[in-house]
Amino acid sequence: MYAAILNQKLVLAINEAEQVSKGLKKLNQESYLCPSCRHRMILILSEEKKPFFKHFYQVKGTGEKEEHLQAKQLLCTALKANGLRADIEVPLLDQQLRADVLVENRLSFEVQCAPLSGAEFAHRHALYKKLQIKDIWIVGKRHYLKNKINRSQKIFLRYSTQWQWYYLEINPFSCVITLKYNILMAALSSELSYEIKTFSLDERGVASLFTFIPSTRKNKISYIQDQKIYLQKQINQKSKLGLKIASLLYQLHYSVADIPDELFLKLREPKEKSPIIIFLQKKLADLKAS
């Protein structure tokens, strides 16, 4: 649709896009309405098509397909408004790969709303590496990070010197991008500690995301008793982790009480081995070497 209602007047998408490009307006800061149904609309900028308006759906439960499509369009539009060359659904390597949002042929934002296996992720990541394109994964509602992390979420983690381990989430219905950064895990369990910063899914928000530098980094610790209870539970339930630690303790003639308390306090990086396992394995190696 090439026209919308703004302040009770009909405006054209091409004119609104021109004002955005000249810096006279911020992208999608205006309340555009559909001339027919009076529902909210957003301005979409495209290099292949003329600027146009699209209905903005905020209804919960619209499904992954709508979430994925709208997220790509909003993100691409915000990137273009910042003067970057960006396109959605760009085929690469003779159709072996399709970039959700390709930026300057150097960066690809992969918007992941559906389930994704580790093998498929590794395949796509390898193809991007072959093309020398940096792939940044930003996830939909299905994969949002809460107080624990599972194996399927770990593949979306990325690392930077400014944000440390971080995770990007997108909500096209609320028009926000959420950055969860300085992500650390408890000594044994999959419980997480992280900081949160939200950005609007528009020109200004995306620019702020790219330049965001945390002012301070909080020093955090695990709770000893919680981690000890978790360890004892794993041993009693004979989980994979419990059996591994129980075996190490048995070979060393140790009990849980022999593990130094400071190891239960230590937070670790999301893909790092537990400091307790590292400690026990080193003790066992030293014992065998003596």
Image (cartoon, rainbow, N blue to C red):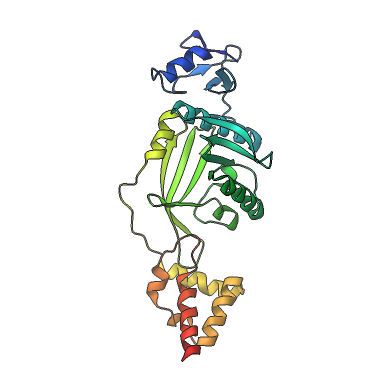
* Residue in the image at 50% along x and 87% along y: 252
* Residue in the image at 58% along x and 27% along y: 57
Residue 288 rendering spot, x and y as whole percentages: 50, 89
Answer left or right for 39 relative to 160.
Answer: right
The foreground one among 176 and 49 is 49
Answer left or right for 221 relative to 71.
Answer: left
Residue 289 rendering spot, x and y as whole percentages: 48, 89
Residue 136 visible in image: no
Residue at far left of view: 215
Q: Is residue 188 above or below residue 58?
A: below
* Residue in the image at 50% along x and 29% along y: 85
Residue 87 visible in image: yes
Q: Quadrant of residue 30?
A: top left
Q: Is residue 225 above or below residue 160?
A: below
The foreground one among 12 and 171 is 12
Residue 136 rendering spot, x and y as whole percentages: 52, 44
Answer left or right for 130 relative to 21.
Answer: right
Where's the N terminus, which quadrant? top right
Answer left or right for 13 relative to 123.
Answer: left
The total number of labels drawn is 0
Residue at far right of view: 95
Q: Is residue 121 above or below residue 250?
A: above
Residue at far bottom of view: 290
Q: Is residue 22 above or below residue 134?
A: above
Residue 210 rendering spot, x and y as whole percentages: 41, 39
